[in-house]
Amino acid sequence: MNLFLFEIILFILSVFFTGLITAAEIALSSFGQNKIDELKDRGESIWQKFQIVYQNPEPYYGTIHLLSLTFLISSVIFGFLLCAKLINPGIVQPKVGFYDDPVRLIISFALTIISIASALTIFSYLIPKAIGFKYSDLLGRLFVVMLIPASRLFVLPAKLLNSLSDFLLLPFKEKTNFAQAKPSEDEILDIIADGVKSGAIDEQEEKIIQNIIEFNDLKAGEVMVPRTEMISIDVNESDENLLRNIILTGHTLIPVYEDSIDNIIGILHSKDVLKMLLESGTITSLRNLIRPAYFIPETKLISEILTEMQQRGERLAIVSDEYGGTEGVITIEDILEEIVGKIKSDAITEQKEYYKFPDNKYFVLGSMQIADFNEVFNLTLPESDEYNTIAGFIAERSGKILSPNETVEFEGVKFELIKKIRQKMVQFKIYSDNNDFREKS
């Protein structure tokens, strides 16, 4: 066998093994913990080998990279020799026209480099990468069996190279390792975006994944329903107002306070109220129905809150500020909506904007739009650019923010403020003395 043929064989083998290791590394990296657990559940003994590599990847990926670099360098050397002989012998035999034609020499060098780079890119990277992804299961199984014993030969060289790299990186306070780096959040989002473009992931799935990634950074204060919008009741509330709150809001769990919303004393479950009404016909003692409240700081991560709520069996938490005041309320549904988006369920009653009691009195939310009010009732309130809601109309007409039980009259109809949170007028009782205020027929 002449030297030229020998160099061809060595070049082909070097390129082949470089590509094989590239494909094998891609295949091996596809076996994460979930896939390993699936192998274990199916009773395949090979899961143990994958588990060994997954738990301690450093020596095994060190072996992969050292082998890959060895064959890559070998490919470059033999590729250079072959191309040089074919394109311009003067490159490897300086006496043969080496100085005679420098332009030809430069062109020969360029063609040699382009030829080697093209061959290695195609046969050692692009094709092996595609094969590695397509046959990841088969290649991963074959390679992991050979990798574990082979790694014993490369443990010492890998450690020496790592130690040398760490020493050189001392000024930068960094360390190196052969194991694959964990992808950053931005890299994961880029991968997801590519998946959407290719059709492998739809836009809804992309949104959920983005929400999950951002989920860990969210705090209670960013997700909660603020105190100005939360529904709560005074422990000394009348039976009428208590039932009104339950019916108007449709909420199952309602915070209960004493004197001030900053003094939450517990949580009322609507089913406890209904049970007492069925058994005794009246609400004898609201305090006896109150369950302990679960308090959290507004700076607490919602990922931690979700875990705690699952462990404690809680569905609602009171968000407190650093001084112990009430900032808002957060529910399991609020947290889950940060992941999957708005949840709409027949089991969850939408908050009603008004409710009629048997005495022809109506309880209306201050946030009800003037236009909606005029469509529902036989009283036409004036519309204005200065306000859009019932609360805005009352504030404009009275020139102030009402206190609870204060009344404003318009065309014989009385608007009595029932509930106020800070400076927000939340609920009104609306009625007329002659009972002619009613809904449109």
Image (cartoon, rainbow, N blue to C red):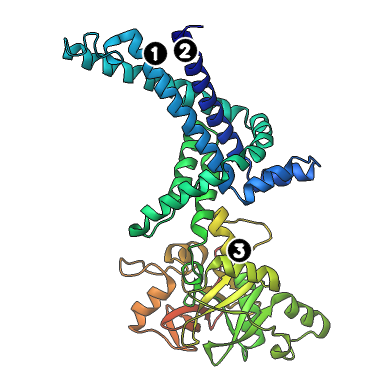
* Residue lying furthest right: 279
- Mark 1 to mark 2: distance in Å? 7 Å
- Report the number of numbered marks: 3
Q: Quadrant of the C terminus?
A: bottom right
Q: Is residue 98 visible?
A: yes
**Crowdedness of circle 3 by 10 Å Cα count: few (<14), some, many (20+)?**
few
**Looking at the picture, which amino acid does disc 1 mark?**
Leu
**Looking at the picture, which amino acid does disc 2 mark?**
Ile
Report the front residue among 243 and 135. 135
Residue at image location 72% in from the left, 85% down from the top:
289
Q: Position of residue 415 (x, y in %)?
A: 47, 80
Name the residue beneath numbered marker 2. Answer: 8
Report the front residue among 162 and 239. 162
In this rendering, the answer to whether 206 lies above or below 200 is: below
- Mark 3 to mark 2: distance in Å? 67 Å
Name the residue beneath numbered marker 1. Answer: 82
Q: Is residue 251 visible?
A: no
Q: Position of residue 285 (x, y in %)?
A: 72, 91
Indicate which disc, 1 or 3, sits on the residue closer to the N terminus: 1
Indicate which disc, 1 or 2, sits on the residue closer to the N terminus: 2
